[in-house]
Image (spheres, grey):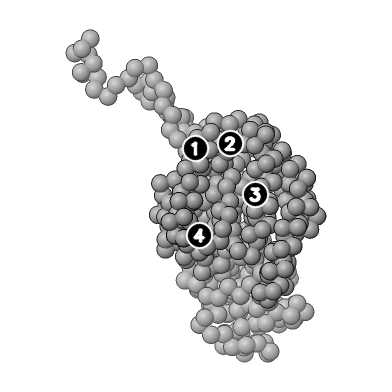
Amino acid sequence: MNSDEIKDAIYQLGHNARTAAHQLAQLTAEKKSDILRAMATSLRADTAAILEANAKDIDAAETKGLTGAMLDRLKLDADRVDAIAAGIEQVADLPDPVGEHLEKISRPNGIEINKVRVPIGVIGIIFESRPNVTSDAAVLCLKSGNATILRGGSEAIHSNKAIAKALQSGGEPAGLPAGAIQLIPFTDRESVAVLAGMDKYLDLIIPRGGKGLIETVVSLARMPVIKHYDGICHAYVDRAADQDLAVAIIDDGKTQKPSVCNALETVLVHKDIADEFLPKLKARLDQRGVEIRADEATQKIIDGTTPAEDADWVTEYLDLIIAVKVVDSTEAAIEHINTHSSQHSEVIITTDDAAAQHFLTAIDSACVYHNVSTRFSDGEEFGFGAEIGISTDKLHARGPMGLKELTSYQYRITGDGQIKDKARQDALD
């Protein structure tokens, strides 16, 4: 397709989505849940077609030489398709945020002001090689009353098309508006630029993928973007820490699943306990095969580390590598984190409640923990049921984004004839 054809096709999707968004905003919670359950049924019924499409993506990915981890993200089987369908049913059972009354204000002149939660409208989601995101994003947007335009990566194009087709074919007979869930059916890079510039129809865009994708979308977008670039997460081991607890939390945060954004990348240790604590930590991390990038103070206490460079304090390893530094105080730890963090997730490990409270209020990150693994920065773990992603922005959503974060609000004002210019009204009367 040439540039004009790509633009025309995507703008038509935008027009369709805007029409659908107006219809979605009027659906009841029960109707949306019925549609979602019908979509789950359709997805299971189309398992064979979805797996056939996925096999094409896997063959192409193997030919391109994608890594084992990337292939695993891409691969579907019957159990994974069933898990996607179960996820849809889980979202169907979640409370509907739309229509929630957030605040009521009664004015002296008799006007009643109600602040009510409403859908955002049309949301564009650009993602890379995980085909399950096609379903996750679509159903979360639908439950929150939003139309969505999806643009997946080339590695999963056949899988994405098959999943989107199953969702649409299952949802429409149950009342899903046409255009409510649309997948851009081609992967030309120009489609990203067109979608990001389509502020006529798109109210919000969410990129999910690597730093390069996110930077591209941010540079092009003419509408709000919700994003996070990196997950440079820190653990600070205070001088009053329970050291065995600290070892366990760091072990979990780094090694339970090192390739995710809420995994630990840096450990800061108070100087008063460094001699005692660091050998304990190294013994555990050695068992897990973790490489330690250490500052000079840490190198003097434990052997077998790699000298840390400046880049190590701002690197998201997504691997069995961790940076370790000895700090003089809680203030020094806070300063290091606020300087080098990606504002994702940080934890203090301490039995000193005053130190913990100071840390919690002084750290400028989306999620700040006390004696809890950063691996809990997740919508499902927070009780949201599901998430569209994790935001390190401050407006309008921050941290794990569930259904409520996919809504805005509206003021609804009622009265009995009040006007601003009362003197003019009195004169007319």
> Depth check: 343 or 216 in front?
216
Which residue matches tag 1? 19
Residue 80 sits above or below residue 168 on the image: below
Is residue 3 rendered to the left or right of residue 98?
left
Which residue matches tag 4? 1
Number of residues whose C-alpha sits closer than 10 Å to that of mark 4, classed few (under 14), some (14–19) or many (20 or more)? few
Q: Amino acid at mark 1?
A: Thr
Give whichever of discs 1 and 4 has the lower sequence position: 4
Q: Amino acid at mark 3?
A: Ala
Where in the figure is residue 207, as x and y percent of width and height?
53, 58
Observer-side mark, 1 or 4, equals 4
Q: Amino acid at mark 4?
A: Met
Residue 389 sits above or below residue 312 on the image: above
Is residue 116 rendered to the left or right of residue 37?
left
Where in the figure is residue 231, as x and y percent of width and height?
57, 67
Q: Which mark is residue 177?
A: 2
Give whichever of discs 2 and 1 has the lower sequence position: 1
Which residue matches tag 3? 164
Give whichever of discs 2 and 3 has the lower sequence position: 3
Asked if marks 2 and 1 touch (Cβ < 8 Å), the reply is yes
SS state under label 2: loop
Q: CA distance from mark 1 to mark 4?
A: 26 Å
